[in-house]
Amino acid sequence: HRRGVNMSSFSSPPDGSMAMLGQIYGESGISGVIEHFYQHCLHVQQAGSRKCTLLITSSHLILEYEEDGMFEVEAGHLRESRKRNEEDDAQGAPTNFTPTNQASDSVDNEHEKNHTTKSNPLFHQVDKSGGDPDGKQAAFEKILRHSNSSAQMRPKTMRWNISELSHIYLRRYRLRDSALEMFLIPTAGELYGSVGLYSSLTSIFVDFGPGYEGNLKRDDAANAIMRRAPQQTIKQWPERSGQFLHEQLRSCTRSWITRRMSNFEYVMSLNILAGRSFNDISQYPVFPWVLGGTSYSQDEVPSLEDPESFRDLSKPMGALNPQRLSEFKERFESFQEAGIDSMPPFMYGSHYSTAAGVVCYFLLRLHPFSQLHRQLQSGHFDVADRLFASIPRTWEMNTGPSAAEVKELTPEFYCNPAFLRNTNNYKLGVTQDGERVDDVILPPWANGSPEKFVEVMRLALESDICSDMLPDWIDLVFGRKQQGPEAIAADNVFFYLTYYGSVDFSSIEDETVRQSLEDQVLHFGSCPMQLFWRPHVKKLPLSNIRIRSFDVYRMSESELPETAVTDTLEVRPRSTNLKPFRDAPISHSCHIASPPPGPHAPLIAVRLAQDRVLAIDSQGVYHSFRWQWRPVEEAPASKRAADEEKDNKEGDENKGGQEKDPTEDLFHDKGNFIAQRDLPPFKAVPRLAYAPPGSTNAKAIKKGITLDQCAVVAISKTMFASRTLMLVASDGDGRGGLCLQLVTGTGSIKTETIIPAVHGARISAIAMDPIGNAAGQGGVGGEVTMIGSCDGSATLWRFISSQFLPLRPRLRFGGHSGAPINGVAVSSALNLCASISRDRCCVFNVSNGALVRSFAAPIRSDGAKLVFARCPALCLSQQGYIAVVCENSIEATSSSKPSVSIELFTLEGIHVGSKDMAWRGMPHRMISITGGKAMMVCGRRGVSVHRISSIQPLDVIDDWPLSLDGDATEYGSSHNTAAAYDVDFGPSLVRPVIAAAACSSGALRLHALRGISVWSEEHRKNALSSAAANALARPAQRLRNVVGGVKGIGSRFLGVSKEISKEAVDVAVDGVKERTGLFGRRR
């Protein structure tokens, strides 16, 4: 399977996709380009698996599919249907086909009545009269034509750049170590021979076949791909697989016990490391039922502080009912007494995670699971009584006396309410009780809202009670109680074919026997890879954790308090917890005003870069600031030790009582800012390539700038060119051109490129979001950028290199019928982007540009019609929400102001809440924080923090005030009122220790957050170390340039100089701390 590819390996499909590859590589050069190829592979996806050949070049992965385009399951069902028809004809059996498992004729009739070929293309009309072979054959031919037409629409060849890989994991497929799963950064992938240009795939799951040969092929392909993948890609090398898992587990567990990772994120991480995959539905991620008892049938929202509201996570689902458990144990003992060598004893005949019984059952209303379900039921939905229709009934079914079900849950129960709605209007039939199956019936306390149900489930998962019990469930599913004596003692024994290693598939020579066993594994579930062999550790209590500033916003996520926030500037705290902005001491803030005279244009964009701040005003002029945090002198070591001993003694005395409030330590950092504005030389003022006419009008600035008078710009969070330059995207010429600049933290422009005619009219909005390692993930770091225009179109760009900037967009979007776009937003975490005009908000897929959803502004309860406001504020939350700004559709008169509000929608377009913003005015920018659970709104008088929730939608939980007097115009601010236009956190959102707000009148506001003293000390040491190393390495570098051909001399001098610099750092730091401040002044 290595070199030596001939042209016959490229079976040219009818659409000429290989001809396109020939144009790229040249007809005679294709065989030389391919460095590795692997035949008889299987591309595993949710919708089905396709046979393919994997080709590897020096820079690309290519999947070449078989010509028919059929999924493996589709082809299997067609073969079975054809065989059944032939057998019936040969035996003279009745020719009518009756769907299996129909309970009664009445249900049959209703089932047929509610299914049509229009609602279900795979549905074939049942012929109850019998004796019509022609009609039966016609029905089969209809299914065959539909399958063939669908197959022809699927791509024949797909291609990915290896530099787009973010994670590479070794996987099991049907309990065989023969698969590989590769994850991609957003906007990755291309395909040929289909109706689209790009693929929507964000990961690739490839199986290399059965037997020992499949394992060898997998390892060889993994090594070949990983050697070509970027250094930033997270790789599970075959020869270091165990070490990789150990390191990843240790990192995840440490983050979880110190409360840096939520319960949901931790369980999901364990699923991924244990080999569970969204691509392979037989190994779908598994989550626990958290609530239990009567929580699913009561009218009141279950109390998350009452243990009775929760399920006992130390027991598997089959052991929750004592009566049923005794039957399981009797079965286990009977198998033990029988002593059947070929079948080890087991308690549960079904599994907690199966393709058909769990994944397709719960996700029945979502694509592609609805189609997979119909394929299993001969082209139609199952009997209505057996479909997933009710949460309370499903809980009773899994915990009642029936011995059939021990289902756990899927991740969607905690993050995606869409699976509970029948949005596609599938005809699911009528039960024997006469109830039509449509949306899933929720617990009474959910009030029919899937969003509320999912959020309460998520709050229960993140609650303290669940956190205490979660290690017990992890032991059952991923840990020491999964197999062996511990599993028997915990009543956690399943059928032997669900465990890895129970059967050596590579040693089975009979293909029929091996395929039969693999089919059982595929359809009846498998246990995850065992990750832990010792009892799982518990999460540390809050009193032992030094929280970060934004952790305060998460601390009440397991609470369900009543709304207690007014629509004014006043914020009423629901608890005595301190807030990072509202309760901060004065010394934690710093205001840098503009030098006289004025008026000054407002700063509209800001970005933190280590100890520098880069800002841009509405005229397009760059402003540079530098800052340092000067901590107060620490007490002597003896006094600190005495204080710590006193605190420990007080803690021991209070042990067993009320825990210490962790927010009391929120303002642990004592000190003050030292900051100044850098003034550029007058002959070379750095600025954007274009600023709108009127932006320099002093009267307009004093009165308040409008959206048309303001420059359009965005600054990247990613640092390019070895982390030295920031990318600035802005309106290039006012006629649709795009300007790209690479700028230092001091505002010096290093490179400038103007791309003309990107759009047909002026660029009106720009949004950027980091990807890859710049976003804290694997893969090459960069920025994905969305640009909106007044011509009603938007474009998507990807920047992953400072040396090769793209000259054309990756995708183009429409959907607004030519109406000017006011705002855009992009989220690499969701793989989605959004654009908004006056009447329509559109959500698109970042990977292939498909329109996911579009919706209009809501109508108020009093009947007032709203429209989307003309402002650039738009926010996509990682929790699956989108926040927009709306105003009255009727133009305001001179005596009244338009009503401005923030409206919260789900990504499905469901309106969940509203917040009147009359006290804040028209928002200028909305930014998601804390993993999408809150957002910051920049507007008049300052910045407010709002909760993103369907239970407490847009509640104000913190406020960063700038001014309390005066008033503001619709978009800008008056001369006597402070307003915030943008906000940023540094050095990163993962470690936010400082906040910077771009304000009106050219002012900058800094705010210290928890941990700024530690970071400042680390940054100071690193700066001194780099300076000393560079100074000592300079002579060695000169000598290396002179010697040239003498290999190794320069590197040895560099190494010696670095060692000397390390020894000198401590002395230098101590000297600086004693004698100088930031700019050389004595303390």
Image (cartoon, rainbow, N blue to C red):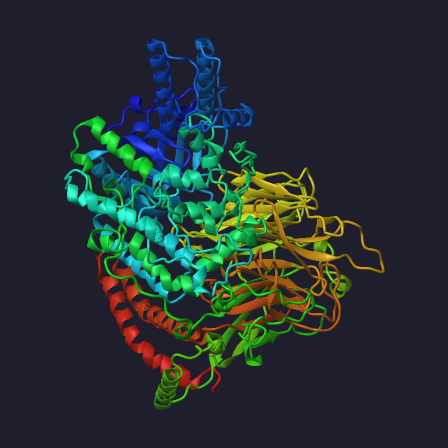
Towards the viewer: 995 or 1052: 995
The quarter of the rendered structure image containing the N terminus is: top left
In this view, 512 is above or below 763: above
Is residue 155 visible in the rendered image? The answer is: no
In this view, 1060 is above or below 136: below
Task: Locate residue 464 relative to residue 948 in the image: left or right.
Answer: left
Task: Locate residue 1075 relative to residue 444 in the image: left or right.
Answer: left
Task: Locate residue 446 relative to residue 264 in the image: left or right.
Answer: right
Residue 647 found in image quarter: bottom left
Instruction: Residue 854 in the image: state x and y as whole percent.
Output: 62, 41
Instruction: Residue 206 in the image: state x and y as whole percent.
Output: 32, 37
Is residue 1064 visible in the rendered image? The answer is: yes
Task: Locate residue 273 relative to residue 1007 in the image: left or right.
Answer: left
Towards the viewer: 702 or 504: 504
Towards the viewer: 943 or 632: 943
Residue 969 found in image quarter: bottom right
Total residue callouts: 0
Instruction: Residue 178 in the image: state x and y as whole percent.
Output: 25, 39
Instruction: Residue 637 in the image: state x and y as whole percent.
Output: 35, 88
Towards the viewer: 465 or 225: 465
